[in-house]
Amino acid sequence: MATKKHSKLKSYLASNYVEFAEDQTSMRLNSLYSDFSKSHAVNPYAFEANVEFWRAIVLDCNQQGYLRTPKYATAINKHTIAEDFRRPLKGKPLALDCEHMEKKGDLMTIDKFIQTYTFKATWAEWFYHRLSPSRYWHSSGEDHIYVIMPTIELIAKHIISEHFEIPMKRTTDHLFTLSAFKHKYAHHFVNEIDLTEDDIMLILRYLHIHYGIAVGENVKGYGTTYQ
């Protein structure tokens, strides 16, 4: 699984970024894979250029579906992200970390995301009982897993845009069962992103806070589990 994932990521990078071409051994690539954090004081322009380049790469590769964790397509693992970009002869990038992106608001830990994008008490109780205890909608303790906020925002905007592009004939056209919502939006709705159930829950939280989407169970007259 990991080998296949790395192969797809490597192919995407080689096809879309000249720095990652198969035969590329430029000074630019050497700089990107070096410990350029040490250049912050002596060459701040080069430092910022490298930081912004890696930021763009991480965001792009995640939004294309090539950089993720086993549980989340919308998150990365800060402990393994450098390893994802390992190259023969060069190894892994030595100065790639998540601190800069977290400060800019691009990344948010799972726990902070859940605390920030919380449901009202009745909906939170519904999710608590619906999801197995192994799912962490309480404190996860996994502060190394970061939600990629631009990806969450991108998917949410696409969902809202597509939904309201279609003329609604009945009020119930605005209602989805959870399974229908997942079926419509989980698989390659945006690029090659294949969302997990955990991703869907993150997106529903985001939609609830930013777009007023309600989530409930046993909606009278319409069945169960609508959002």
Image (cartoon, rainbow, N blue to C red):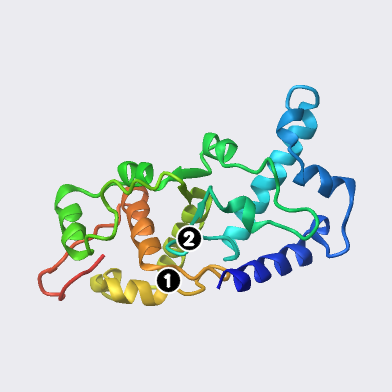
Q: Are marks 2 and 1 in contact (CB under 8 Å)?
A: yes
Q: Give me the residue at 77% from left, 42% from top.
A: 34
For disc 2, the neighbor class at 10 Å (few under 14, some 14 to 19, many from 20) is: many
**Which quadrant: the C terminus?**
bottom left
**Which residue occupies the extreme top position in the image?**
41
Q: Earlier in the sequence, mark 2 or mark 1?
A: 2
Three-letter amino acid code of the residue under disc 1: Tyr
Q: What residue did someone put label 1 on?
A: 185
**Which residue occupies the extreme left position in the image?**
220
For the residues labelled 2 and 1, the Cα–Cα distance comes to: 9 Å
Residue 168 seen from this side: no
For disc 1, the neighbor class at 10 Å (few under 14, some 14 to 19, many from 20) is: some
Disc number for residue 155 = 2
Q: Give me the residue at 63% from left, 55% from top.
A: 83
- Residue 181 location, quadrant: bottom left
Residue closer to the observer: 181 or 97: 97
Give the answer, above or below, for where 181 lies relative to 27. below
**Which quadrant: the N terminus?**
bottom right
Residue 19 position in % (x across, y down): 82, 55
